[in-house]
Image: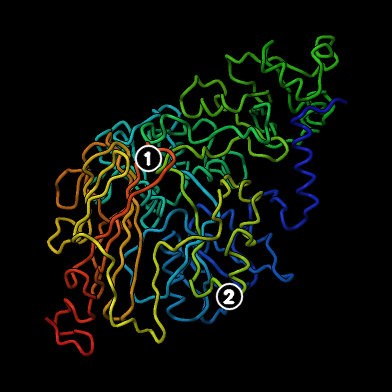
Amino acid sequence: MRVSPMYRRVGAAVTVITMCGGLLALPSAPAQADPTEVRQLAGVGSFTTQDVMNSLASTITLNGQKPLASYDTSGSSTITTKNSATCTMARPATDMAGEQALSNSRQLGNGCLDFARLSAEPIHTPVGPSPDLAYLPFARDAMSFLVSSSMSRRLSTADLRAIYTCQRPEFHPYLPATGSQLRTDWLRTIGLYSYDKAQYPCVKDTLPGNAPLRDNLGVVVGLFDSQGIVPFSMAQYIAQSLGRVNSTVTASMGLGVITDQSSGAAPLVANTTDYPSGLSYIGFGNNAPKDLTPTRLRAIYTCVDSLVTNGSLTPRMPGPGTIRTAFLAQLGISEADVDRGAYPCLGQWDRNSQLPVNSIAPYPIADYIGELVGLQRDIHKSASLGRIGNYNPYKINASYGAMLVHNVYNAIPVSKTTQSPWKEVFVGPSSLICAQTPTIQWYGFLPMDGGCGVGTPETTLQPQAGGMGPDTVIRPMASGESVTIQHGKCRITGWYTNASRYVAVQGIVLAGQRCWIRVSLSGINYEHRIPWAFDMQYWYYASWLPIPTPDGSHDYRFFWPSLQGGTYTLKTGNMVDYAIFQVTDLDVQPYGYTAGASWGPGNPGMAPANWCDRWNAPGAPPGCTGT
């Protein structure tokens, strides 16, 4: 039998995975729920990453033991992670709840939790008196939306903002419940930095019966509401649509494209590495398998597989053309043998009609994606795309959009990054998690393009020895309390002010079409005498329409730290010492940036910020009389 190039690719890959044994073994079914045994590293948090982390927990071993225990966001009302007397807690159901539970465990020192799952770049309230966390990326995801098949799938940022502010009644908008990072990132993406649910009664974040809407629940745009729209993780879409995990999506649902942030491109692309011909197959009906080995696919099309011989499944072919020719070559079947009737089970399929029930037929992966997002006429209709050789036929489009493709993280205490078993499991490109590229891809995520398990934490609390900070903190040089910087055509001014319309640190875009802005804040917590810092990122597109700002105005050029869907306010005892602003013109290749610094409200010029500076009595730190 002649073996096609694709068969050689798939067969070789399967052999490698099998030979590697436990280290790189791929899961064959949806991963288990809560662990049934106590393990060294217990974690909670994001729904988006719970399936891949559950699978990694069942696969990874260290010194002959499985160290990871990953707990789902749903199930019983409580979980017990370690000692039942001290480590029985309410089940965290969101990213924020998981991270807060980890922080609580660290503050109590009970060791009940050791890591938290986060589905995107962490966004935080100002640093408080809790141990610091390191946010270690291990994969990349993307964000888009789902709609029912009858609704428009190609929407701009302005369209989405209008939908989620109740100005497009033909859409029924849904959001994951409060505490979801997907909810926060979605609102930020469509320009709703400060979101008052009561102001927009059309938006729902609960299911019938008032249960909170969890992340990535596709049924809200199908079973519950034919006019619904909901944000969705693309890794979860891949995993659900291909049967990797329990699915809430169907082939008839529409996958959305945010047109002005993605140049109109789809959030998914064909996996041409594992499908060099660009072809897989579609199946319709209960007897149509979702996953076939190359050998079994050929057996079906040569009429020897039991599904065919017992009449349960009909393999079909389109009429003459490139799809038919390429698929027959992929199978190692000649057109001459088909013409002479060597394979009498083969049926015909007119691509202008619905694939008959309990049938499979070859299908271009790119066409299937184009139909999902409304770029092409829907031919596959209710038929689902199948997998060959256990490879996903499509993957996340890494170039989908700067705001839409992002890292996913595990958060661990900074103090544990050099300690076992955290170090071996989470930290660095050679960590046990980062080594699991096949499993990460199996669940729809993209592997990291460098930097897996490393990176500066978004929020860092760095106590000095004995919990005391230095007596003085020297500011960086700057030209004043505001700074104006430019990269390419993007020009911004950022500043610190005590009389802010919004918050203490803010800025405005003066020029540019597509700009990325980063604000790094550093300051002092007087109560605990420790320095703190965190970073925030913003995107500005000139095509965006004006959006509401906290004071009721509508000027979308202003930016300020946006935290958990609200605005940044300094916690009592926290003072900004300086802010560093960076700007990048996203239309300039290769990317670079320009940076500038602005100091805070301490002494002017280069004088140090004294612990007593701007601290009003009563309640001033010891040794300070207040001002």
Q: Are marks 1 and 2 in contact (CB under 8 Å)?
A: no
Residue 586: numbered disc: 1
Along the viewing direction, whichever of 389 and 614 lies nearer the viewer: 614
Q: Position of residue 309 (x, y in %)?
A: 82, 26
Density class for disc 1 (Cα within 10 Å; few <14, some 14-19, many ≥20) is many
Q: Name above or below for residue 539 compared with residue 162.
A: below
The residue at which mark 2 appears reads as 419
Side (left or right) of 79 relative to 99: right
Circle 1 — which element?
loop
Which is nearer the N-term, disc 1 or disc 2?
2
Residue at 54% in and 60% down: 72
Q: Name above or below for residue 103 compared with residue 515.
A: below
Quarter containing the N terminus: top right
Q: Name above or below for residue 148 compared with residue 568.
A: above
Q: Position of residue 118 (x, y in %)?
A: 47, 58
Residue at 24% in and 47% down: 492
* Kind of residue at badge 1: Leu
Quarter-of-image position of residue 133: bottom left
Residue at 27% in and 61% down: 579
Density class for disc 2 (Cα within 10 Å; few <14, some 14-19, many ≥20) is few
Quarter-of-image position of residue 241: top right
Along the viewing direction, whichever of 250 and 235 lies nearer the viewer: 235
